[in-house]
Image (cartoon, helix red, strand yellow):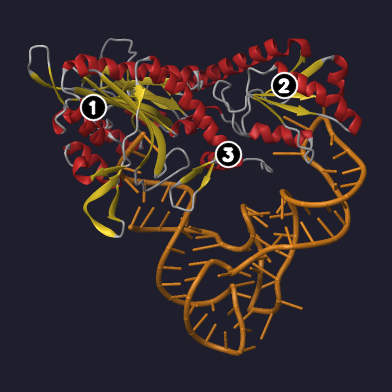
Amino acid sequence: MSEDKLTPRAENYSEWYNQLVQRAELADYAPVRGCMVVRPYGWALWENIQQALDGRFKATGHVNASFPLFIPMSFLEKEKEHVEGFSPELAVVTIGGGQTLEEPLVVRPTSETIIGHMYSKWIKSYRDLPVLINQWANVVRWEMRTRLFLRTLEFFWQEGHTAHATAQEAEEETRRILDLYTDFAVNEAAVPVVPGLKSKTEKFAGALHSYSIEAMMGDTKALQSGTSHNLGQNFAKAFEIQYLDQNNQLQHCWTTSWGVSTRFVGAIIMTHGDDQGLILPPRLAPIQIVIVPIFRSDEEFSLVMPVVEQVKAALAGFRVKVDDRSEVTPGFKYHDWEMRGVPLRLEIGPKDVQNGTVMAARRDIPGKAGKTLIQQDQIAAQVSELLKTIQASLLQRATEFRDSNIHEPKDYADLQNIVQNGWAYAWWCEDAACEAKVKEDTKATTRCIPLDQEGGSGRCIVCGQPAARKVYFARAY
RNA sequence: CGGGGUGUAGCGCAGUUGGCAGCGCACCGCGUUUGGGACGCGGGGGUCGGCGGUUCAAGUCCGCCCACCCCGACCA
């Protein structure tokens, strides 16, 4: 239950986040360090995220499958950069059934290797391509520092793994998924994101290059909210994923991988949440509308409840919850559902029964300002309209916040200043040394080179050498 | 793994020179309440993180260990 006020965001952002996650009953700490229990309400949100993504995957020809949790250690070692990237954070099983294993098994940190192994068995001909498989799974990465949803030892995600005949097709797939993620983030979660290319130092271990969608959180830090990797032929060569082309020539495939994780729940929390608690975008909210009946006596109760049921029935197409708890007051319920981020609350009391009205309160506009009186006979249409408005206003608000916190530095000193409380958008020569210097001086890293560039050229903000593209520098989660 | 902090009821905490383990919230019962976090009365709930030591007596003093949180290095 949400009995007290949250620590305000301005006072201590991470404290606000931790309290919100627990009080909104999204997740709780597990008895294992760094692990979380996703509670039913948090999981329902994740399920809605899954549904929105899965529908998009299916619509673009992908199919789901499931690969093993355990991966032979030797598989990881087949791709040099991959094993170097992941070895520090592997959980390794050395005993099974009381016996020391011949070969240690890695608990998957990601599945490129074992899927690559299977693809080499399955793919023989150009007629077998492309292979477009996704899996919804849990993975384990032994992180030093953990935070609920944002970074835990075990997390849930989807990982897509595709194999193609040509480099061009693989790149098209990588970009198609990046677009798909962008569409999901913007249109389902109302989280404005910047799609772009990761720098060499920030790319996935083993990839040719990586793309990401980057979102700005309420404290102006960046959160990588989804990634799409063009793996080139690196894994195809390591796992001998080969096919015969039309000319009977043996060719290595071109592969991709891409993922969105439960971290995205953190993105939603930190993009929309306020000091009252969570604010969920209507399209993903497990409960879109909560109805709070108001009554003083048994007579009023029996007067009000039939109307509550009528309204609920009229809203059959929506995810509606009637809060009929008798042990708490309406005021308590308001705060309670505000903590949980339900986008729209309907209050129905004796006055409404008499007047044929319903009081609607928008979660995104606190207090009286967000309340409007709706006629009962127009409830479905009005609610539908309100939810759309809330969805749009969340996106607009988040976009305005982000844009007002992105600045173009005029020199290096200015950049150092900007990244303390915002993103710096600047020319960069794409040399890792300049990236490293910024990180050293400010803790900010390059987030991505946005695909949408206005063109032209300039001088690297760090070293002054010629630069062809601009990049975002920001502190990140 | 380095630095800091915290472990006492479900949660948040108090517990003085060592002397019957407490408070608020939550929970259960009854009654009154209910349009922005209601109130009264009654009640249940504890290996004081663990192990060892000092002492007539340890939540309190000493030692060791463990866990978790925060800040760093690493990361979806």
Residue that badge 2 annotates: A312
From the image, tell me which residue sits under label 3: A20
User: Do the numbered discs 2 and 1 sit on residues whose CB atoms are within 8 Å?
Assistant: no
Residue shown at 61% from the left, 18% from the top: A390
* Residue in the foreground of this view, choosing between B10 and A313: A313
SS at badge 1: loop
Please give the chain letter of the residue carrying mark 3.
A
Residue where numbered disc 1 is placed? A463
Of the two numbered discs 2 and 3 in the rendering, the one whose residue sits closer to the viewer: 2
Number of numbered callouts drawn: 3
Q: Nearer the viewer, mark 2 or mark 1?
A: 2
Label 2 Cα crowd, 10 Å radius (few <14 / some 14-19 / many 20+): many
Q: Nearer the viewer, residue A332 or B4?
A: A332
> Where residue A349 sits in the image (x, y, percent)?
83, 25
Residue A476: in sight, yes or no? no
Q: Horizontal and vertical percent for residue A200?
A: 23, 29
Upstream in the sequence, badge 2 or badge 1?
A: 2
